[in-house]
Image (cartoon, helix red, strand yellow):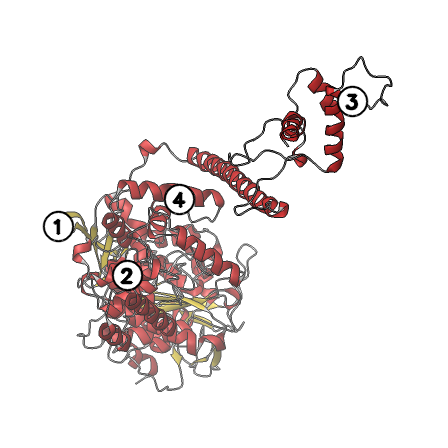
Amino acid sequence: MASKRRQKERVEPKFGGRAKSAGFFGRSKPAAKPPAKRATKAASTKTAAKTRPAAKSTRKPAARPATKAQSKAAAGKVTTFRRKVTPRPTRRGGGRRPPARRGFFAGIARLVRGTVYWSVVATIISVAGLAGVVGYYWSRLPPSSEWTLPARPANVRIVSADGELITNRADTVGQTLMLEEMPPFLPEAVIAIEDRRFRWHFGIDPIGLVRAFAENFSAGRIVQGGSTLTQQLAKNLFLTPERSFERKIQEVVLAVWLEASLSKDEILELYLNRVYLGAGAYGVDAAANRYFGKSARHVTLAEAATLAALLKAPSRYSPIANPTAAEERTHLVLAAMHEQGFIDDREASLAMSQEIRAVRDVAGGSGRYVADWVMDQLPSYVGALDHDVVVETSIDLRMQTLAASALTKTLDTEGPERGASQGGFIAMDPHGAVKALVGGRDYAQSQFNRAIDAHRQPGSAFKPFVYLAALETGMVPETVRIDERVSINGWTPENYTRDYLGPVTLQSALSLSLNTVSAQLAAEVGPQRVANVARRLGVMSPLMATPSIALGTSEVTLLEMTGAFAAFANGGEGVIPHVIERIRTNGGDVLYEREGSGPGQMIHPGHVAMMNAMLEDVVVRGTGKRAAISGWPVAGKTGTSQDFRDAWFIGYTGALVAGVWFGNDNSKPTKKAAGGNLPAIAWQRFMAPALEGQAVVGLPGDYRYMSPVHYPENAIPVVIMGDDGEPLTVAPGTTGSIARAPTNGPQAEPRKGFFRRLFGG
């Protein structure tokens, strides 16, 4: 037995090297056992061979090839074999560990190590790539040393003549409020619906980004944003509105910078004072004034929720334009506030039960045309603003509302039949202070100001300048000219119906708006003299000094024409139409105040009296009959351009001047919209209630017509068509004065003396 144990110990190195070896996790292994019987037999044979004396051998045993391991052993090297022949460690309690189990745990270990390794590698690569992208777009920003919060732009508060707010205008409007000045539920409403983790994130909300991605992926479109309040503020303060990857990266960089530079309360306060909330309102105070007619200091819980609801889409959730959608969104904000603990059950229920009463804009939005005009002029008065100002205007809010209503009603009722889709209206006192201004049918649809900026042909409304030029050369209203076909340097003007009256007075020719007589007068006095008269009265648009100037072929603006007619209403003084009366700071320091009334006397008082007598006859029995107002002397002139593309009426009393234009923006011909219909109707709709309750003011001057020239009693009455498209009958035996069938509308009393002598009454 001992001999066998010794033989076993000698041959063990050939199979396993040392008696024990370290396992995979460092545990010692038991000595390897010899392999199967074949190995034991070979070992016994070799042992016997070693103990037998070599000299006594009589026969050599068959030679067996030496193995590689045996060759190494013979050379004195340590012999080790492949792992598969190494005996496995025994399990506790005896027996061997199953080979398959050891392979399973080893595979798991290798998988875990590989996953961790490649995850780390991927993370490093991703972070490096992201850092590179961020660094690139960061380099495209100005140096961080130059990053400063932009100063809040100056607010311009525009008020009416009696101090009522028309609108606020600037890049940001309304007063800047501190958080302490706002009701606590106002910022809470914004946080609840826009950024519920605002108090905890660092400018970027990873949870919000993941949620937004999931929502958008599920919907297949962008339905939710992942921007925080800080990101929105960064975009509003520093970046353009474009949607691009570069802008998004820069937004993130700036948001983190804001978080590092400002406290949470400072960020929130800045956001609430700068955010756009629709209808031209920037900041919660301006929005509260715009929608509720009050400061943000005094809004209710329901109103605060409505303001917060606007952040998602100001136009879609406007309480003025879309009250139903605004109410639904408001309830959603209140529910979010309740869910996050800002309000309790009772407060939420009470707020949801309240009706949101939004205030309408001044004159249905037309006040914004006034604001645009004010802002265009403001730099020329005070230069660039670095502080808030109040602009006091000449606007009368009651008249502004009346003008907007008259224009809209006429377009809605008579407009479709006449094929007119747009209009402009302006009213001023006789010294040029604008009382009402409406630049179009709907400011929300078109911000183009047709009362100020549209250049259109005035047609016959330009003729008063021709007649004034004629009077200034010595003619009088009773001067007679022949209404007949004429040719002036190859140009042949025609009357509307191509009918001609023969001899007529200037008074009748103007009242009937006869083209041939106007053309003759312009040729007599010279087209340049006519242009000079118009320029003297304030028409600054380029005028072509050609014979056709008599028919109003040069394009002018409604503002210019109305201002020029104001000289007839005030006794001949030139006026400069204006809307700004005074500009002051919030503290009361006056920066500008209007002084003076205009350039002085532009028309001789005698000529003013003659013009007023003739232009009054236009309304009494001429083409402007529809503009008559009971109890008030009214004068004015209709105008219609070629193919009925433009229809005008400029009229005045001793207290107020107003001009109206109707047509289409694309200059498409209307369906016979003429100065005597749509414009005269709208003018009367405005002027009658505007003058209601005022003492009657007569027209300047008291011209007495001289005895008219009589024609043969057998003269045949002539029927012509006026600018309004209605027949006018010239009585026989007169100088062309007009007789018209009686109407239901009020008629001004004729001047004493002239018409009694004219008609024999």
- Mark closer to the chain start, 3 or 4: 3
Point 45% across, 57% down: residue: 212
Relative to 728, residue 551 above or below:
above
- Disc 3 designates what residue? 66
Give me the C-alpha separation between circle 3 and circle 4. 75 Å
* Residue neighbourhood size for the residue with mark 3, other residues' Cα within 10 Å, grouped as few (<14), some (14–19), many (≥20): few
Give me the C-alpha separation between circle 4 and circle 1. 40 Å
Give x and y (percent) for residue 550: 44, 59
Number of marks in the rendered image: 4
- Disc 1 designates what residue? 587
Q: Amino acid under label 4?
A: Val
Q: Of circles 3 and 1, which is in front?
A: 3
- Where disc 4 sits, the SS reads helix
Q: Are marks 3 and 2 in contact (CB under 8 Å)?
A: no
Quadrant of the rendered image containing residue 188:
bottom left
- Mark closer to the chain start, 1 or 2: 2
- Mark closer to the chain start, 3 or 2: 3
- Disc 2 designates what residue? 287
- Mark closer to the chain start, 4 or 2: 4
- Where disc 3 sits, the SS reads loop
